Image: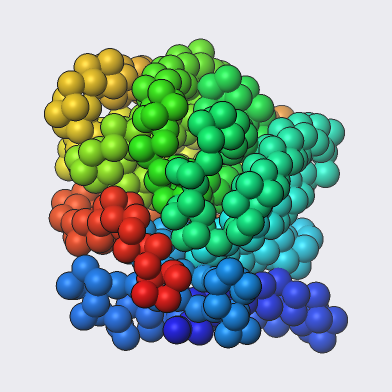
Amino acid sequence: MDIKILFLILVPLATAFLIPFIDLINAKLRRFFVLVGILLESYFIISIIINNFTEIMSGNFFLKYYLGGWHPPLGISLAMDGLSLLFVVITALSLFLIVVYSIGYIGHHEGKYYVLYFLIAAASMGAILTADLFNIYVFIEMLTITSGALIGFKRSKEASAAAIKYLIYNVLAGLLFFLGVLLVYFNLGTLNMAQLANNFASLEAGNQLFITAIFLTSILIKMGIFPFIFWLPKSYDSAPSPVTAVLAGILSKVYLYIFIRIFWTVIGFETLQNLNLNIFLLDLALLSSFLGHVFALQSNNIKRLLAYSSLGHIGMILAVLMLNTEAGFYGGLLHIISHMFMKAGLFVACGYLLQYTRTHAYEDFKGVGIRNLSVFVAFIILLLSMIGMPPLLGFASKWYVLMAFLEARSYFGAFIVIFGSLTAVIYYLRYIAKGFEEIKITDASLKEEIYSRPLLSVLYREKIVSFITYAYTGFIILFGLGFRFFDLPLRLSIKSIMNVQRYIELVLGG
């Protein structure tokens, strides 16, 4: 057993609870304490990788921890295999970048923001590391409450309405998930995911179908897959940019992880096939991807456009995973990594650029690139990666997704990948061209602009925010040229997904 995986949850949780006490002592210490918390989290992850490097290289990596020393089914289990290690690393890296970005961006009510932020970090790590179905529900609800509060962080009428709508959909999804947990427990008498994986196939077909449908509906709502596609863009539009970076870059990936863990490990992909749900999910995901790009094409709001684009990409990822092939997993997981960096980078770039606009509308984007050329160039590079332009990371991940669809003879899936890229060229180029349009600044508009830019008026804040934008762009270029860096962690993750029996044996003490 390795207690370090427990600390990956406890460190951000403790940081969140200690921040108010730090504020009482000295508010200026808060930022230092926040950095210490995120650096300590990074230390434990690096320590796990270094201490288990041989096992990782050999493909035999697995860590577990039984809380209180209580073994399944009596106690709560934590487990880290190749798949959860990959998600922990990319989640922690993005959390680190966004927390540094927030130091330069948030300003007002910063203490409350960081409390919520670190609760999201703790819940994300908990959802990835738990081997207990009920605790996934607990961490999902933590994510719902904290992210809902952050969406309404501006306390405006629009932000409050978006937060309420977000909470309604996500609380409904959480209740469905809880119902699924109750049904599983009443039928199988356990909530340990390894034991559930051993016994789920023994349920009657009717019970299997009902429980699967309950979990499926819950997670599809969380991910914004059609027909639950319309609630999410409003949340992205109303939230502060670091919050939308968390929503698009982290939370959507955590829900993808939960989807994989439940429907490949707990319920089992064979069950989906026996219930004839795999083809249905594949087609539903492709339809959702298609609609996401279509709605992005007609959007006249940059943050809503990025939200609909995210839905298009999440649908594509879900579809390629549903192929249940090694090529599909490789392309899907690589695009999860790619999309996390691309979309988080785009939202942090928007946080900088939109300070120069009155609204998020297309018309107000005029001239943004001329005034902020270096950040706008970084923004363009991230957009080109979203399109799939070589040699950026988005090209590599989309290429493998496309090849996976072609290998499986899913030609509609291949069409959606190409359609999404061609459509993205149109709706992204509109904003690139608008950003380079010359704008005539009058004395009145200049005065309005000056008084509407309180957030980044301090030089160090502007430097921090722009630096994080460049960092995300650098990752996209660097890993685009060296995407083979991900080959080992991706192969290890695929092995974890496809070898369910090994996960069962190791969690249960084998």
Q: Position of residue 53 (x, y in %)?
A: 25, 79
Mark yes or no: residue 315 visible. yes
Please give left or right for residue 59 compared with residue 456 in the image. left
Quadrant in which the N terminus is drawn: bottom left
Please give left or right for residue 228 compared with residue 178 in the image. left
User: In the image shown, does 442 or 38 lie closer to the viewer?
Assistant: 38
Please give left or right for residue 44 compared with residue 118 in the image. left
Q: Position of residue 148 (x, y in %)?
A: 73, 46
User: In the image shown, does 251 or 36 lie closer to the viewer?
Assistant: 251
Q: Position of residue 79 (x, y in %)?
A: 46, 69
Mark yes or no: residue 121 visible. no
At horizontal 37% and vertical 30% (from top left) the residue drawn is 273
* Figure check: 263 above or below 305: below
Q: Position of residue 121 (x, y in %)?
A: 59, 63
Give the quarter of the image for residue 73: bottom right
At horizontal 77% and vertical 63% (from top left) the residue drawn is 112
At horizontal 63% and vertical 73% (from top left) the residue drawn is 74
* Figure check: 324 above or below 300: below
User: In the image shown, does 175 or 275 lie closer to the viewer?
Assistant: 275
Please give left or right for residue 377 compared with residue 116 in the image. left
